[in-house]
């Protein structure tokens, strides 16, 4: 995955699906949407973090998971904004014929290639996005256990276990992305595009190979696996709630004392129904926002020229910009889920807003 143009130079004869002008237009449009979503996501997740802290997040495993997820989403949105700004500057560089600022009128150039900001932001974006995916799955499993085993839930998902699992997730995410991060950097060299010396991006020749290996071994399995786990959790909880609904219906018609007493554990309140709705909505958002990523990477598998440095590089970069944008949407939309399906969150947020 990468962001804007200029990372890899194509041969002049290489023709893609779109022209350089088309790419600039598409990237400007996507960047405009992305910067809006990123700023909204940063603000929304700050609100989430503040609210969950008031809810005493460190006293409950599930609330703590919501807090950590909001922190991760905040970092995803922040680095998405970094990518967006770098993308905008890079497209301007292309528009002005390899000059970020027209030296004939201003005599100045940026001291750092904007692509550096794009790649740095992208590396951090991918790291925290992976952490968000893992936390989302963990939260889904926790919610599933909450419905299936309400009496045992507090003993299964504790604050200590949540912190331990989260620490494992962040170390795993960092370990997975570290090879890609270390195979690139910034150096002070001559940049032929502006005919001057400045800080520019360098990449190891094996970086693209490492990126492809990470996709095959990590990114694709994690994306698909996460969607499968979320779907299974929904099905399991739906079955439990359906059984509970039948039990309430039977007992309301006839008070049969011979009914299995174990079913009494499956008496669920409207709050439990909201838990299922919350997970369904989170899952739908997750699946929707991950579908473009799966399609894009499937295209790279089927068509070898759909990649950096290949014939369809421009279209690939536009596609990746769209992927980053929808991933940012995924990390920005959770505030609506919390507000409409978590009454305690809504009450505290409303009270805090009124106090301010």
Image: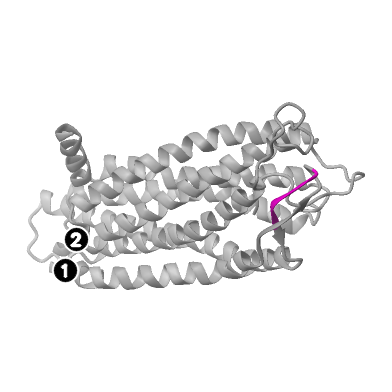
Where residue 39 appears, x then y in whole percent? Answer: 44, 38
Task: Measure the alpha-carbon separation of dots 2 and 1.
Answer: 8 Å
Residue under label 1: 262
Region in magenta: 195-201
Residue drawn at 77 percent across, 48 percent down: 313
Q: Quadrant of the N terminus?
A: bottom right
Secondary structure that dominates the magenta span: strand
Q: Is residue 288 visible?
A: no
Q: Nearer the viewer, residue 69 or 291?
A: 69
Q: Is residue 112 visible?
A: yes
Judge whether residue 65 is colored magenta: no
Identify the element where label 1 is drawn: helix
Magenta span has 197? yes
Marker count (numbered): 2
> Where, quadrant-wise, is the C terminus in this rendering?
top left
Residue placed under numbered mark 2 in the picture: 266
Q: Residue furthest front?
A: 107
Instruction: Confirm or deny contact between disc 2 and disc 1 (CB under 8 A).
Output: no
């Amino acid at each position: 995955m990468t962001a804007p143009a200029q990372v890899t130079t194509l041969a002049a004869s290489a023709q893609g699906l779109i022209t350089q002008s088309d790419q600039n237009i598409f990237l400007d449009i996507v960047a405009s949407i992305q910067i809006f979503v990123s700023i909204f996501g940063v603000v929304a997740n700050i609100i989430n973090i503040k609210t969950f802290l008031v809810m005493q997040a460190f006293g409950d495993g599930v609330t703590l998971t919501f807090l950590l997820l909001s922190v991760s989403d905040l970092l995803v949105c922040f680095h998405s904004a970094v990518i967006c700004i770098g993308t905008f500057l890079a497209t301007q560089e292309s528009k002005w014929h390899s000059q970020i600022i027209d030296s004939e009128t201003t005599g100045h150039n940026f001291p750092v290639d904007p692509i550096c900001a794009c790649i740095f932001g992208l590396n951090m974006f991918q790291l925290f996005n992976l952490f968000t995916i893992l936390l989302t799955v963990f939260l889904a499993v926790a919610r599933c256990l909450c419905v299936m085993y309400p009496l045992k839930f507090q003993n299964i998902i504790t604050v200590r276990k949540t912190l331990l699992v989260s620490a494992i997730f962040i170390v795993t995410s960092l370990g997975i992305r570290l090879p890609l991060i270390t195979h690139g950097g910034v150096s002070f060299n001559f940049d032929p595009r502006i005919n001057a010396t400045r800080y520019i991006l360098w990449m190891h020749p094996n970086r693209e190979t490492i990126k492809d290996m990470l996709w095959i071994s990590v990114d694709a399995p994690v994306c698909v696996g996460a969607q499968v786990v979320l779907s299974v959790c929904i099905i399991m909880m739906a079955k439990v709630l359906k059984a509970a609904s039948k039990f309430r219906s039977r007992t309301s018609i006839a008070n049969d004392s011979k009914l299995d007493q174990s079913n009494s554990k499956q008496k669920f309140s409207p709050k439990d129904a909201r838990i299922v709705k919350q997970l369904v909505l989170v899952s739908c958002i997750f699946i929707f926002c991950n579908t473009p990523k799966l399609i894009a990477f499937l295209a790279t598998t089927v068509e070898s020229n759909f990649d950096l440095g290949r014939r369809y590089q421009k279209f690939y970069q536009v596609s990746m910009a769209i992927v980053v944008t929808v991933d940012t949407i995924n990390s920005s939309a959770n505030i609506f889920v919390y507000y409409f399906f978590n009454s305690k969150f809504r009450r505290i947020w409303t009270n805090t807003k009124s106090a301010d």
